Amino acid sequence: MPPEILGLNALNEDDLHFVSEVYVHLEDDLKDALRYLNPDALEFLHLQDTFEPMLRDFVTDLETDEEHKKITDHILESLRKNETSNMEEHILRAAHLRRFLG
């Protein structure tokens, strides 16, 4: 889950409007970050109701990094099966693609 979206759900519509006025490239930066959002991760974490409406209204025309999604799909499947022994490689590959470990 891209850290750039953490906390955005706490903002109301007026807050988002203000932030987008003072942070001129907010939408562009969010689009860049959200390329790495795997919607299945929101579901896995039970956060889809929290983030999806805000993201749908705030950022349009999202493009998904398919390679990153494939890797994070594997990570999510491993978590579902509680098979976490070989996840480090996949986590590092995903981090390398998005150039951020967190």
Image (cartoon, rainbow, N blue to C red):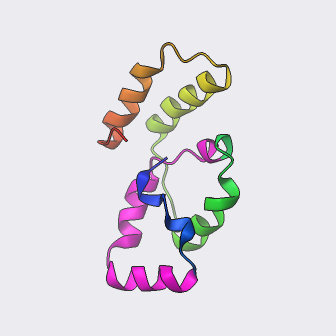
Q: Is residue 23 left or right of residue 3?
A: left
| Residue 86 in picture, x, y percent from top left | 48, 14
Q: Could you say where residue 56 lies in the image, as x and y percent from the top left?
A: 60, 67
Q: Residue visible at 47% across and 59% down?
A: 5
Q: How many labels does the image show?
A: 0
Query: Which one is in front, 89 or 12?
Result: 12
Does residue 30 appear left or right of residue 56 in this picture? left
> In the rendered image of this protein, does residue 39 appear above or below residue 54?
above
**Residue shown at 61% from the left, 25% from the top:** 79
Q: Is residue 51 above or below residue 46?
A: below
Magenta stretch, residue numbers:
13-42
Left or right: 9 as drawn, with respect to 88: right
Q: In this view, does 3 lie above or below 101?
A: below
User: Which image quarter holds the C terminus?
Assistant: top left
Secondary structure mostly taken by the magenta-highlighted segment of the chain: helix
Q: Which residue lies furthest to the top in this view?
A: 85
Residue 99, picture quadrant = top left
Instruction: Give the x, y percent position of residue 37.
Output: 50, 48
Q: Which residue is more in the foreground, 8 or 59?
A: 8
Q: Where is residue 43 in the image (x, y as percent from the top left)?
A: 68, 45
**Residue positioned 56% across, 66% down in the render:** 9
Q: Let me know if residue 1 is in the magenta part.
A: no
41 to the left or right of 1? right
What residue appears at the point 53 percent right and 74 percent down from the top-left corner?
11
Q: Does the magenta stretch include residue 30?
A: yes
Q: Looking at the rendering, which quadrant does residue 18 occupy?
A: bottom left
